[in-house]
Image (tube, helix red, strand yellow):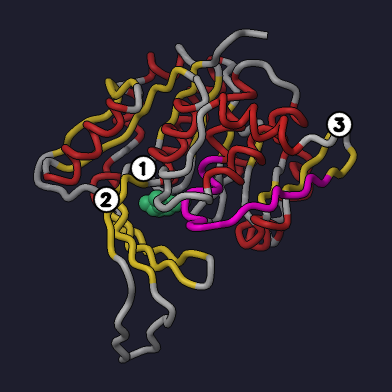
């Protein structure tokens, strides 16, 4: 097995504006919440950071605006060791942001796409060499769907496997069903996916993340279930992204599916023990230690 993997992420980069509250306001109501903070986020960038912390070489393709959030996020990605040659700064557009409400041990998120909307097929075409240099490609749905389809086409052309994390869920074109090695919805996204007649033909390539209820997937045509690890959750934002980044990192280096899922499941559990989407994302050493501690001998 190769020591490391090169993961290409084509996806969103957001600044997360996060506020905790005991009470979610009703329509027309104002409530006094708890702490407010800004954190680096965006499903694409989160998955990139997750894979990089686990030792993968990560190439990110995405866009930011020419503003303070954009500059801060680019510095941050650089500090995480992510190759940002594929990130473009676009004038006269805001960097993407996400309003995050933390309540009842879970999160509610509204995204304003900003520059992420401008990651077009032509944009990705300019960086196709980055895709060609990768072992695996990881996509989410916070960039235009036509770009997701185009990236799949390029990766399929080069024979590079693609994981599509269908979040936030939108109706999936046939090319996404047929061109992805794996799709990784959460339970809510799965409900929508299942209404699509195309779902049945690819269900064995679907890995479902179910938060504290574990992970469901198929191995050798058999349905499998892996329970989650019990941890004290401080912020569940980015747990799915950690899972996806870790899964890509492991599959990219040639790990067997079940081993890769076990590893990603452990990484996701560790990620919720700190605040911020990327705050708790672990290093490879931390995941190895956690798995060792949790393995009954
Ligand atoms: O998956 C969590 C992420 O979703 C947040 O970081 C936010 O930016 C949104 O993209």
Is the CB–ligand 1 distance for label 2 below 8 Å? yes
**Viewer-closest of 29 and 138:** 29
- Residue at the limit of the structure toward the bottom, as seen here: 28
Dot 2: element: strand
Return the residue at label 3. 297
- Part of the protein shown in magenta: 225-242
**Viewer-closest of 104 and 238:** 104
Image spot of residue 279 (x, y percent): 41, 44
Q: In this rendering, is residue 32 above or below 257?
A: below
Return the residue at label 2. 96
Name which residue lies at 56% across and 57% down. 233
Residue 87 in view (yes/no): yes
Which quarter of the image is occupied by the N terminus? top right
216 in the magenta segment:
no
Residue 170 in view (yes/no): no
Which quarter of the image is occupied by the C terminus? top right
Name the front one of labels 3 and 2: 3
Q: Earlier in the sequence, mark 1 or mark 2?
A: 1
Name which residue lies at 9% across and 46% down. 92
Name which residue lies at 43% across and 67% down. 102
C-alpha gap between disc 3 and disc 2: 46 Å
Label at residue 199: none
Within-10-Å neighbours for mark 2: few <14, some 14–19, many 20+: many
Image quadrant where residue 128 sits = top left
């Amino acid at each position: 097995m190769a020591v490391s993997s090169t993961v290409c992420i084509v996806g969103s980069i957001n600044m997360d504006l996060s506020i905790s509250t005991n009470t979610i306001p009703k329509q027309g109501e104002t409530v006094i919440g708890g702490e407010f903070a800004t954190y680096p986020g965006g499903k694409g960038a989160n998955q990139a950071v997750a894979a990089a912390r686990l030792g993968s070489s990560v190439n990110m393709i995405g866009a930011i605006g020419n503003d303070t959030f954009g500059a801060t996020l680019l510095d941050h990605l650089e500090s995480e060791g992510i190759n940002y040659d594929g990130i473009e700064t676009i004038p006269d557009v805001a960097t993407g942001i996400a309003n995050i409400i933390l309540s009842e041990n879970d999160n509610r998120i509204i995204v304003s796409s900003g520059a992420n909307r401008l990651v077009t097929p032509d944009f990705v075409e300019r960086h196709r060499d980055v895709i060609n240099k990768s072992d695996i490609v990881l996509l989410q749905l916070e960039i235009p769907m036509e770009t997701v389809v185009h990236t799949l086409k390029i990766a399929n052309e080069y024979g590079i496997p693609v994981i599509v994390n269908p979040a936030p869920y939108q109706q999936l074109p046939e090319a996404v069903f047929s061109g992805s090695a794996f799709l990784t919805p959460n339970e809510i996204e799965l409900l929508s996916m299942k209404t699509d007649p195309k779902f049945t033909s690819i269900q064995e390539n679907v890995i479902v993340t179910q938060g504290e209820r574990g992970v469901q997937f198929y191995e050798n045509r058999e349905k499998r279930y892996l329970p989650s690890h019990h941890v004290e959750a401080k912020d569940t934002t980015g747990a799915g992204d950690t899972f996806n980044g870790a899964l890509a990192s492991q599959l990219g280096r040639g790990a067997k599916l079940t081993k890769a899922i076990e590893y990603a499941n452990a990484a996701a559990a560790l990620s919720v023990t700190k605040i911020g989407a990327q705050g708790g994302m672990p290093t490879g050493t931390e995941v190895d230690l956690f798995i060792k501690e949790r393995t009954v001998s």
